[in-house]
Image (cartoon, rainbow, N blue to C red):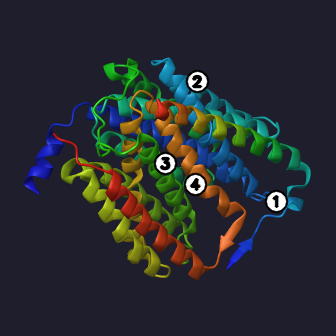
Amino acid sequence: MIRFVFDPRYLSANAAFFWGCLAVLALLIAVSFIIAYRRLKR
Amino acid sequence: MKDGIKRLYGLKNIGIAYICCYIHFITEVICFYYLTRATKGVLNAWMIPFIYDGLAFVPQGVIGYAADRRPGMALTVPGFALMLLSLTVFGFMSASIYISLVLMCLGNALVHVDAAEATLKNSFGRLSHSAIFVSGGSFGVITGRVLAIYGVPVWFVLLMGVSVIPFIAASFGYEGTKESKARGFDYVKPGKSPLCAAAVAVAVVIIRGYMGYGIPTSWNKTLAQSVYMFVIMGLGKALGGILSDAFGIRKVAVASTLLAIPFLCLGDKLMFVSLIGVMFFSMTMSVTLAILVSVMSDTPGLAFGLTTIGLFLGTAPIFFVRLSKGADIAFISIMSAVCSLLLNRILKEPER
């Protein structure tokens, strides 16, 4: 029913860029939601 | 019916919607021309669109919040400068693809936030403005792809990019742009928790983001069919806001999410049936934005950013996991029904 299509081996030489971007994105999502949460709670 | 059409006559500042629609159109032309060319014949090409989705959509929350705190920053100017620089680096220099990719994403994010803020702050709580603005993107996506597929040179697209200068200048003439608030948005029922309303809006955006990629469209094989799909998507987005202003946001939100289900599920091999479904499901775009701005009228940029983050969260799983066709249809049907129910519970018709 669910098929995983992601294989980290395919990243090859770009792995550092990919994981770096993912970390930045996670941080930005967290910051945005925290700001929104604080403003909505006010 | 007549009353509904009459309500559209007095739309103030509708000019800003067309200005921002063109700015959005050109932004997507540049981005999707770049993406189509950058992924052509590249091994692991999926990574470039994934990173693009992330780096273009996600920072809009933080950028939007910064723009809310200092209104009138004219982020479209540095945004376009970055996008044109990215295209120049990509087209005429032998630098790494990731340099141009990051520049393109940042430029895209800046332009989106600025144009969205301009439409929201000048629309006096009407949805037509933001709906017309977002619809420009769909037309731009497919135009950019077509230009790249037909081998149009980079300089021509750069020239198209430069054509936005008078439109950016015209957008400065609207007074609301310099304000920090988006006034007049009041679409959430009294007594509903703002946090709950925002969570529902983001959830609906996430589901719609997934549906955008996940809907079964095995009919879509040729370039012409892709053009039809994006044109209908653009029309649906624009119609969602315009019909909401004419007949009421709640009716349009509930009807469009419910009506989309049968057309999307039965349209896997039938283009016209599927296109009707695509149009209905695109209609909720401005509705979710209106909900978020209603509860966050002090920070319209952040509200817009939350919708783009939701879009990324909805599309990201597609790059990692796939559902079987049956599971996909079941998931889409159930989620659309849930969205419709939730929207019905939190939306109210504003008094005009």
Same chain for marks 4 and 2? yes
Amino acid type at mark 3: Ala
Instruction: Return the residue nearer the eye: B193 or B334.
Output: B193
Question: Going from the N terminus, do you reach mark 1 or mark 4 first?
Answer: 1
Q: Secondary structure at mark 1?
A: loop
Which residue in the structure is indicated by mark 4? B145
Give the answer, above or below, for where B81 lies relative to B224: above
Q: Quadrant of the C terminus of chain B?
A: top left
Amino acid type at mark 4: Arg
Q: Quadrant of residue B83?
A: top right
Task: Determine the residue positioned at 52% across, 77% down.
Answer: B330
Task: Determine the residue positioned at 79% across, 57% down.
Answer: B42
Give the answer, above or below, for where B242 lies relative to B305: below
Q: Is residue B117 left or right of residue B6?
A: right
Frontmost of labels 3 and 2 is: 3
Mark-to-mark CA distance, 3 and 2: 32 Å
Which residue in the structure is indicated by mark 3? B199
Frontmost of labels 4 and 2 is: 2
Task: Determine the residue positioned at 31% across, 36% down.
Answer: B185
Mark 3 chain:
B
Mark 2 chain:
B
Mark-to-mark CA distance, 4 and 2: 24 Å
Frontmost of labels 1 and 4 is: 1
Q: Are marks 1 and 3 in contact (CB under 8 Å)?
A: no
